[in-house]
Amino acid sequence: MSTVHLITGNVGAGKTSYAVALADRLGAVRFSTDEWMVTLFHPDMKDVMDLPWTLERIDRIEDQVWKIIEQLAARGIDAVLDLGLSKKDHRDRQRARARALGIETKLHFLDVDLATRTSRVNERNAEKGESFAFEVTPEMVAFMEGWFERPEGDELAGAVIPTSR
């Protein structure tokens, strides 16, 4: 039976790097919202952040991702979802989609302090290396501090919480 691995953590926690390493280790297929957004929609983005516009496109991406996950699961191949998953209801929707297909899920929570995450974001912005999809501004980091909902209680049952991040 295949598993869908849900990667969550606040901006700069190292989700993409972790997802890449996990997919490699498991022989899984990784899906990253940032990569799809940049490729499919970045040229159409407005100068000012438009959250409803962005979320609607993320929903479209996820619909396509789940069509592929269904095919992977039929072949016994795991999927790693690097979709941000900042809100509990977003994580719950992914679990429900997996459950509807008879696929197990495992949450991976990257719990990293703000100072470390801010330093990582600044470094990633400067280096524009492999995990760079777009520049994350200080305003985006501040927004995400209020947007992100930490997994708690039952949601953490069976979760993987790496300690060396």
Image (tube, helix red, strand yellow):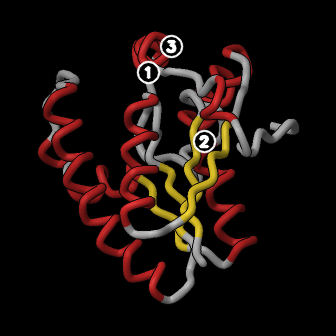
Task: Find the distance from the CA under tag 3 to the CA under tag 2.
Answer: 23 Å
Which residue is situated farthest in the bottom direction here?
75
Label annotation for residue 16? none
Q: Which residue is mark 2?
A: 127
Identify the residue at image location x=54%, y=45%: 128
Residue 112 shown left or right of residue 86 in the figure: right
Residue 82 location, x and y as percent? 51, 51
Task: Find the distance from the CA under tag 1 to the CA under tag 3.
Answer: 13 Å
Q: In the rendered structure, which disc, 1 or 3, sits on the residue that comes first in sequence?
A: 1
Identify the residue at image location x=60%, y=27%: 151
Q: In the rendered structure, which disc, 3 or 2, sits on the residue that comes first in sequence?
A: 2
Q: Nearer the viewer, mark 1 or mark 3?
A: 3
Residue 140 location, x and y as percent? 41, 19
Please name the amino acid that badge 3 sits on.
Glu
Circle 2: is it few (<14), some (14-19), or many (20+) Cα within 10 Å? few
Determine which quarter of the picture holds residue 13. top right
Q: Nearer the viewer, residue 139 or 67?
A: 67
Task: Find the distance from the CA under tag 2 to the CA under tag 1.
Answer: 14 Å
Quarter the N terminus occupies: bottom right
Q: Are discs 1 and 3 less than 8 Å apart at CB?
A: no
Determine which quarter of the picture holds residue 68. bottom left
Q: Is residue 131 above or below residue 10?
A: below
Residue 108 shown left or right of residue 7 in the figure: right
Q: Is residue 70 above or below residue 32?
A: below
Q: In the rendered structure, which disc, 2 or 1, sits on the residue that comes first in sequence?
A: 2
Identify the residue at image location x=36%, y=57%: 97
Q: Which residue is mark 3?
A: 145
Residue 49 location, x and y as percent? 22, 24
Please name the amino acid that badge 2 sits on.
Glu
Residue 67 location, x and y as percent? 29, 72
Please name the amino acid that badge 1 sits on.
Thr
Q: Which residue is mark 1?
A: 137
